[in-house]
Image (cartoon, grey):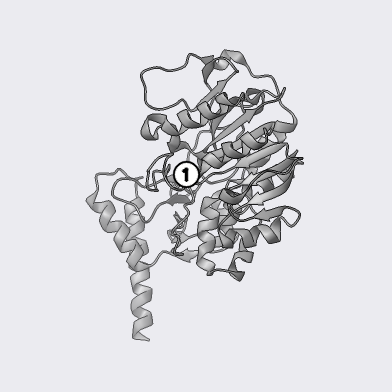
Amino acid sequence: MRIASLFTGIGGLELGLARAGHRAVLACEIWSPARAVLAARLPDAHLHADVTTLADLPGDTELLTAGFPCQDLSQAGRTLGIGGTRSGLVGHVFRLLDERAIPVVVLENVSFMLSLDRGAAMHRLAGAFEERGYRWAYRTIDAQAFLPQRRARVFLVATRSDLDPADVLFQGDVAMPPSSTTLASHAHGFYWTEGTRGLGWAPDAVPTLKNGSTVGIPSPPAILRTDGVIVKPDLRDAERLQGFPADWTRPAEEVARASLRWALVGNAVSVPVAEWLGERLRDPRPHETERDGPWPTGRGSWPRAARFDGTTRHAVRIGAYPVFLEREPLERFLEHPGTPLSARGTAGFLSRAEASSLRFAPGFLDAVRRHLAARRGERDAALAA
């Protein structure tokens, strides 16, 4: 299908769809570092800067994609809701659909929007599609099904064609294989900037890559390696943890500081999830209606998966892993050594962790203390020299 893409970012959704045979003809993105990446990586797509000035979509558009801004919907963001200045831009999706009814629409956003403001974002999105005669289905999918990054996102497919969105999204449902990791056998990811209320602990994986700061302050996770060293992953490995080729975002440095590449990566759609979706769009399979359940009443949040068949809304019993691909351990996946977490960063994390009531894996805090002692020793030796 020919794709018109809104809020394109660095093209993760479009790259994945392209690997499944689809093609972007329009990419709309306002942030200049991301547009620099798109100009280099999606050279055949027409670039438009501002969705608010986009009057219409190309006449041959068959698929509209929109990974609309999540800042107002995310737990890590401002949680202003769907009416916030950034996330409210999704309204332009429906303005453009009113100009041209595109047969298939794909939206992507954070899973927190299912519960924020008692599901207000989903009420608005679902209602807007239903008013325009679309059937819809959505599913929470975790990128860890494909890569060693824990990243749950909602993918919504809406259609005004013979294609049933349930036949696209509800294929495959597997359990995550049981894990027997230890600090000695596998690397473990966590948020070194946390430690008071949460940790983001991820055995043999990293927690969700974040977008960092709009002023270019990176926010990579930490990885405790089996040798006891705590590192922040190299940016090239962060790109790979999203499914991009290494250095995919390098063109951004032509217009912005290099540190902003972390925000570009953290905001992106994971490529292999998009590829899986693209393959399902090409090869839909009948939805197993026995997965359907009654629509929940008296609760604020929406189900983790659901569908609207044109008449009735159904909750759908299906998990976040359509597959669980075999992969090499995280420590071998990483192609670059990363940067050891500094003494200052380690000390700050340790002080928060020790003062918290969080429970930690056996030996974890001791490993952090040993890393801190090693970093302080290196610092003192450098000062003495």
Relative horizontal placement of residue 190, taking residue 160 as reference (left or right): left
Between 326 and 294, the residue placed more toward the observer is 294
Query: Does residue 326 show up?
Result: no
Residue 204, image x, y percentages: 50, 46
Judge left or right: residue 256 versus residue 59. left
Mark 1 nearby-residue class (10 Å; few <14, some 14–19, many ≥20): many
The image quarter containing residue 36 is: bottom right
- Residue situated in front as seen by the camera: 129 or 361: 129
Q: Which residue is mark 1?
A: 87
On the image, the x and y values in percent for residue 136 come to 59, 26
Q: Quadrant of the C terminus?
A: bottom left
In the rendered image, which quarter contains the N terminus? Answer: top right
Rendered residue at 48%/66% (across/down): 339
Asked whether the viewer can see residue 385, the reply is yes
The number of numbered discs placed on residues in the rendered structure image is: 1
Q: At 52% from the left edge and 70% from the top edge, which residue is drawn?
A: 257
Q: Is residue 55 above or below residue 220?
A: above
Badge 1 marks a residue whose secondary structure is helix
**Identity of the residue furthest to the bottom in this view:** 385
In front of the other: 374 or 299: 299
Amino acid under label 1? Ser
Residue occupying the point 41% across, 44% down: 84
Closer to us: 204 or 288: 288
User: x, y (%) of residue 29?
Assistant: 59, 53
